[in-house]
Image (cartoon, rainbow, N blue to C red):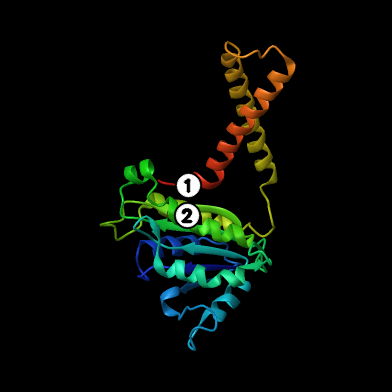
Amino acid sequence: MKILGILGSQSRQGVTAQMLQQVLDHVDATIETETIFLEDYEIHPRNVHTNNDLQVLVNKLAASDVWVLAAPTYWRELSGIMKKFLDCLRPELVFFKKNGDTIPGPFKNKHYLTITDCYASTLENWLTGVTDETFKTMDRVMSAAGVIKVGEIVCPNTLHLSRLPRAKQQLCARYGAKLSTYVRKDDATVKRYVQLFLMIALMALVTMTLQLFLGKFLPLTNFWWNYLSFTIIFFVLLACLLHFVTFVKHRRR
């Protein structure tokens, strides 16, 4: 097993680099790790530049089982070098159908962890989600490639920060240990079924409560009216919850 750290920042010693290194330092000693600093490479789309290290990086991705994507958040978005790297990787990560749709490519079922940080305060990031778009961009790419997410780490309030806070060091260390066990495709099946059951139970309760309220205005004593209203309300609520959990909710503190 091998874990590849991908550093998409402007500094080798900054907060982003410290978070990535803290994760890799706490991976099981029997597991091989490697870090690549994207600024060291010439990254361009294929057949655009003569000097292009894209294939070198693709080979490193292929030789690794887990990727740790670490990049700071600038202007509420992913850092430029990491975004360029992911853009150039697109033909390598997915297969294209005739109609332009994509399906997961050769890296399907690998695993990944995302790391970011920002100048915004902890409170501001918690309330407004300054780092959300950074996570969404990386998740969108990895999801299209069929790569399985392990988790995400964020460190806000880094404007005058030179050393990673102890709490974040401990969080990174825990993820380092966690990565050591991510060898198989999906080892959280039971957890996912429990989460799904709880979501369905909550949505059923909310739906029935709303039906009691709507019963004052609609003839819900009729079986079909009752069935139709339950189905519509349940679907809308469940869709909103799944969208929030899958695409909106991100670690902010």
| Horizontal arrangement in the rendering, residue 242 relative to residue 23 (left or right) | right
Say which mark, if any, is on residue 135: 2
How many neighbours does mark 1 have within 10 angstroms: few (below 14), some (14-19), or many (20 or more)?
many
Of residues 147 and 64, which is closer to you in this image? 147
Image position of 101 with respect to 10: above or below: above
How far is mark 1 from mark 2, CA to CA?
7 Å
Image position of 138 with respect to 61: above or below: above
| Quarter of the rendering containing residue 93 | bottom right
Label whose residue precedes the other's in the sequence (1 or 2): 2
Q: In the rendered image, is residue 146 in sight? A: yes
Give residue 145's position: percent from left, percent from top: 62, 62
Label 1: which residue?
A: 250
| Quarter of the rendering containing residue 3 | bottom right
What amino acid type should be assigned to the residue bearing mark 1?
His
Give residue 91's position: percent from left, percent from top: 60, 72
Give residue 36's position: percent from left, percent from top: 48, 74
Residue at 63% across / 57% down in the picture?
182
Judged from this view, the residue extending furthest toward the left is: 160
| Quarter of the rendering containing residue 16 | bottom left
Residue at 59% across / 33% down in the picture?
236
Contact check, label 1 and label 2, Cβ < 8 Å: yes
